[in-house]
Image: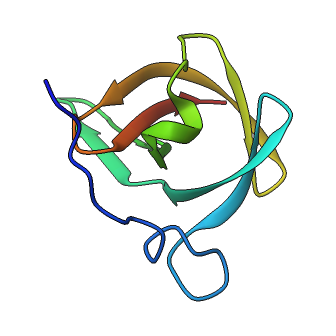
Amino acid sequence: MMAFAEDLSMFFDTELGAAVPAIYKGKTIPVIFNRPFILEEGEVASIASSKPEATCRTEDVQDARQGDRITIEGVTYKVVLPMPDGTGITILNLHV
């Protein structure tokens, strides 16, 4: 699949955009960090948690692998699953 060639810099601007700086493999890269709330309801009890993920420019994490570490807002996360979408964006599913 051919990568989508679009200028994504405005989305990953850490001063004016939605991005925050992250440390990945010794480099500072911009990421859009999300921690969506998840509520799993059971018959007896419900479990609330979050599912952290970092949306990145693929060029910054093109060699991302399961088990890699990334530090965002002072917390180090383990990459559970890198998901490149073919448009120049990769979502890293994360776990503390």
Q: Residue at x 58, y 40 (%)?
A: 60
- Against 58, residue 37 (above or below) is below
Q: Residue at x 53, y 11 (%)?
A: 66
Tell me how the rendering is colored.
rainbow
x then y, percent, for residue 18: 50, 76
Q: Quadrant of residue 7?
A: bottom left
x then y, percent, for residue 20: 65, 66
Q: Residue at x 78, y 28 (%)?
A: 25
- In which quadrant is the N terminus drawn? top left
Q: Residue at x 54, y 12 (%)?
A: 65
In this image, 75 relative to 4: left or right?
right
x then y, percent, for residue 77: 68, 32
User: As rendered, which of 68 and 29 lies closer to the eye?
Assistant: 29
Q: Quadrant of residue 93?
A: top left
- In which quadrant is the C terminus drawn? top right
- Against 41, residue 12 (above or below) is below
